[in-house]
Each structure stands twice: as structure tokens, then as C-alpha cells.
Amino acid sequence: KFIPIFEDGGQISRVDNFVVNEVFSFLESRRLKGKIVVPCAVNLSRMDFFDGQLMKNILDKASVCNAELPLLKVEVTESSYESLETNARDCLYALKTLGVQILLDDFGKGMSSLSTLESFGFDIVKLDMGFIRKIGENKKAEAIIKSTIGLAHAIDAKVVAEGVEKKEQYEFLKSVSCDMIQGYYFYKPMPEEEFVKLIEDQGKK
């Protein structure tokens, strides 16, 4: 809920810049210590693309931290992407060229457009939780989810289902070849210390 406050106050880029720096530091620190490293995604606000300094910082760090690039993912919502000017979209192309994966977030929320998928080579499409919550209750929603996954795969994009909270949702998504599943069914947001312990414990299994 605090994000719109920072956006309205023109401070969201400062917050996102801090997050980007923290993610790069975390990935680099884990790699240098020989620890298990997992991909990390950063959500960018539409306003970030109008902050030349923030985009320069991301591009500079991406060009220096080559070892971390395959592990960094940048998320942009469909509505944000559609509102971007050409030069802002060029920033996404530059990141993708460096090896950063670009995610289209909240696909299916609002006025989704197939032209969005056609206009940019998104690596991953994230299905909006509004559809996921209808699994088991709405056959049309299930058909749309299945078709969207097939469409994404046809254009060489992977699919993440967000907001998964029930076993029934998880089982359905597995049955329709969803690539990745995210939600409280597995874990809730947690502090960095708990997250590190989790991935290290899982690495021992």
C-alpha cells in the first residue's frame, strides 16, 4: 500500500534504486562465498523509466556484474509497459541484450492485449492472481489459463502463476504445464535471514 504514496511523491525511483543495489549485492556476495544462489526478481515502477539515473545505475551494474546477470529478473506490469515511450522500452531491450530476463507481470489484469506479447520478447509471463483464484470454480477461467500458457510457450516464453494458495490450484497448474508457481501455498514473504536459511536447507536435500 505504501508504493502509490512513493509514486505520487516522486520518490519511488529512490526506493527501487535501493532494492536494485541490494539485489546485486546479495547475489554477488552469495556467489563469492560459494553459496547457493537463486534467481531474484525486481519490480520496476512505470516512473522508474523516466529516471535516467536509475536506469543508468541498473545498466552499469548489469554490465559489470556479468556473473549475476542470468540470475536477475526485471518485472514490469502490462499497464506500465503499454504506457512507456520508445526510449523507455529501449532500456528494457538493453537489459535483455545484457542477459537480464524481462517478466511481463499481471498478465490478464485489466485490458490485456496480445500485441503486448508480440511487441517485445518477454522471457516470462506472469498470470494475474485474479484468474488463479477462479481455478476449481470457473471452467472458462481454467480454459483461458490453459490457452494462455500454450500461447506463451508458442512464443518461447515461460509462465509463472502468482497468488497460488490452494492445492487444487497447484494441481491444475501442474496439469496444464505451468512452468513456475508462486504463492502462499508454498511460502509467505520472509526476512532475508529466513530466506537464506530456507535455500541452504533445501540445498542439503
Image: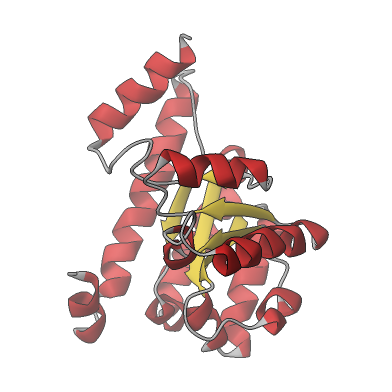
Number of numbered discs present?
0
Q: Quadrant of residue 114?
A: bottom right
Residue shown at the point (71%, 64%) measured from the top left: 147
Which is nearer the eye, 111 or 38?
Answer: 111
Residue 157, position as x, y percentages in the image: 72, 57
Residue at x 71%, y 83% (from the top left corner)? 115
Classify residue 8 by image quadrant: bottom left
Picture quadrant of residue 156: bottom right
Vertical relation: 107 (above or below) 161: below
- Residue 2: x and y in percent read 17, 69
Vertical side of 165 occupied by 20: above or below: below
- Quarter of the image with the N terminus is bottom left
Q: Is residue 201 above or below residue 187?
A: above
Q: Report the side of 197 relative to 69 (left or right).
A: left
Query: Can residue 36 be spotted in the picture?
Result: yes
* Residue that sits furthest to the top in the current view: 204
Location of residue 19 in the rendering, given as x and y in whole percent from the top left corner:
33, 55
Residue 18 falls left or right of residue 129: left
The percent coordinates of residue 108 (x first, y second) are 54, 73
* Residue at 56% in and 86% down: 82
